Image (cartoon, rainbow, N blue to C red):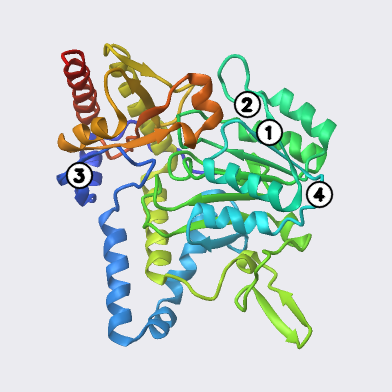
């Protein structure tokens, strides 16, 4: 049972300390945490220290000297997800982890991948690639009429009728604050013994993630977003059930397998079978420190503060003329998306940049179903995190309001 004794909201003193630990707060209002969170000072220092050690004694030697810190990546990530370190594999990104997981599934012509209309763009493209190469069928479960995300009962009916080879769901899509009911979907997958893959790229570090509660067989995430780790780092969770069943990546190397005789290899017993020999060890160590940092702050506290800041931002933007908020669901995550009249995407983002506000653009090609349903070609995405302040939220909303007036005067 996780400790939830710490109170919310953060005290003013705690928030000052967190911001002092975040050098980027001195120069920008960073509302692009769904793209890449600001590194905390301990993460930066740990990475630089390892790079200096590599320069001083050699890369292999530095990795050997820092084995304890490297192993902590697996222990820390396991603590974050409520699993064993042996269930965790390091990856270069969430997409890297995702494609390694997909490559382990022996798809055949006629197999069904059951997914949603809000799965991440790279996942959707991967499914289409599998369809092109192996002849699999891609089935998209319908959304619920109330806008709360996928219709779970309709999805469960498709599970029973189509018996998919894989059920795949993105917890929070990159193009909105929608939170999909992954645990409810997982209960149906367990009942029907279906393989279940969850993309938690936007939720790890923002919400508490319990793989036992979700009931997933595979889960992927990046470390660079709400976890505030370095770029070029991510991970794959692999359940005991999948490991026992012998799933392994298509291209397994000398780290994930043992060449036991000239004509045969044997995969290692843990999720390390999904890893390669070469690692960016400074990123591995930095990711471990970032995860420990999040655990120390308290993910349950982050899960309250971060969406609350986003809710405040939506409330402020709702009254701005020419702005249409696009997020759906009863309790959206900290990804605030909207369209604004009178602006083209790049000039609008550049105007936000000029005001020291970091943001991101989403386009229809990122979300072919969702943006078509919403009848938008592009949206600006603002994603605050726990180290941001209420004053920054108000400043960002005021900037959008100012730019809305500017557009009206053109």
* Rendered view: 313 above or below 93: above
Given residues 351 and 290, the one toward you in this image is 351
Q: Which residue is mark 4?
A: 109
Q: Nearer the viewer, mark 1 or mark 4?
A: 4
Q: Which residue is mark 3?
A: 25
Q: Position of residue 8 (x, y in %)?
A: 35, 31
Q: Which residue is mark 1?
A: 185
On the rendered structure, is 213 left or right of 266?
left
Indicate the secondary structure of the residue bearing disc 3: helix
On the rendered structure, is 279 left or right of 407?
right
Which label belongs to residue 150? 2
Does residue 311 show up? no
Separation of disc 3 and disc 2 at Cα? Answer: 37 Å
Separation of disc 2 and disc 1 at Cα? Answer: 9 Å
Mark 2 touches mark 1? (CB < 8 Å): yes
- Badge 2 density bin: few <14, some 14–19, many ≥20, Cα 10 Å: many
* Rendered view: 42 above or below 125: below
**Among the two numbered marks 3 and 2 on one chain, the one whose residue lies closer to the N terminus:** 3
On the rendered structure, is 119 left or right of 110?
left
**Among the two numbered marks 1 and 4 on one chain, the one whose residue lies closer to the N terminus:** 4
* Rendered view: 71 above or below 328: below
Q: Residue at x 80, y 37 (%)?
A: 191
């Amino acid at each position: 049972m996780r400790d939830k004794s710490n109170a919310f909201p953060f005290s003013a003193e705690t928030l000052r300390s967190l911001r002092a630990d975040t050098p980027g707060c001195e120069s920008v209002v960073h509302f692009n945490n769904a793209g890449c969170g600001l590194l905390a000072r301990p993460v930066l220092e740990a990475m630089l220290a390892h790079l200096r050690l590599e320069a001083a004694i050699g890369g292999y030697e530095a990795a050997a000297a820092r084995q304890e810190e490297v192993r902590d990546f697996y222990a820390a990530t396991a603590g974050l997800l409520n699993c064993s370190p042996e269930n965790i594999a390091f990856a270069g990104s969430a997409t890297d982890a995702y494609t390694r997981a997909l490559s382990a599934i022996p798809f055949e012509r006629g197999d069904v991948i059951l997914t949603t209309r809000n799965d991440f763009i790279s996942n959707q493209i991967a499914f289409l690639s599998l369809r092109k190469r192996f002849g699999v069928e891609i089935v998209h479960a319908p959304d619920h009429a109330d806008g709360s995300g996928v219709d779970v009962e309709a999805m469960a009916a498709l599970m029973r009728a189509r018996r998919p080879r894989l059920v795949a769901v993105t917890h929070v899509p990159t193009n909105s604050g929608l939170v999909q009911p992954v645990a409810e979907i997982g209960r149906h997958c367990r009942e029907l013994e279906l393989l279940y893959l969850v993309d938690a790229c936007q939720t790890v570090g923002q919400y508490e993630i319990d793989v036992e509660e979700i009931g997933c067989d595979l889960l992927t995430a990046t470390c660079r977003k709400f976890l505030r780790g370095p770029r070029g780092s991510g991970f794959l969770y692999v359940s005991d059930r999948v490991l026992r069943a012998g799933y392994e990546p298509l291209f397994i190397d000398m780290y994930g397998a043992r060449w036991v005789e000239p004509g045969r290899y044997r995969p290692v017993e843990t999720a390390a079978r999904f890893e390669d020999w070469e690692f960016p060890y400074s990123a591995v160590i930095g990711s471990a420190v970032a995860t420990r940092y999040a655990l120390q702050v308290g993910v349950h506290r982050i899960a309250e503060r971060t969406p609350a800041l986003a809710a405040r931002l939506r409330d402020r933007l709702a009254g701005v003329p020419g702005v249409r908020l696009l997020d759906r669901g009863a309790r959206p995550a900290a990804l605030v998306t909207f369209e604004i009249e009178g602006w083209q995407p790049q000039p609008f983002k550049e105007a936000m940049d000029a005001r020291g506000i970091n943001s991101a653009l989403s386009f229809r090609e990122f979300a072919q179903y969702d943006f078509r349903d919403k009848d938008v070609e592009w949206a600006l995405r603002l994603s605050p995190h726990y180290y941001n302040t209420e004053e920054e939220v108000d400043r960002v909303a005021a900037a959008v309001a100012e730019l809305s007036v500017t557009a009206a005067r053109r």
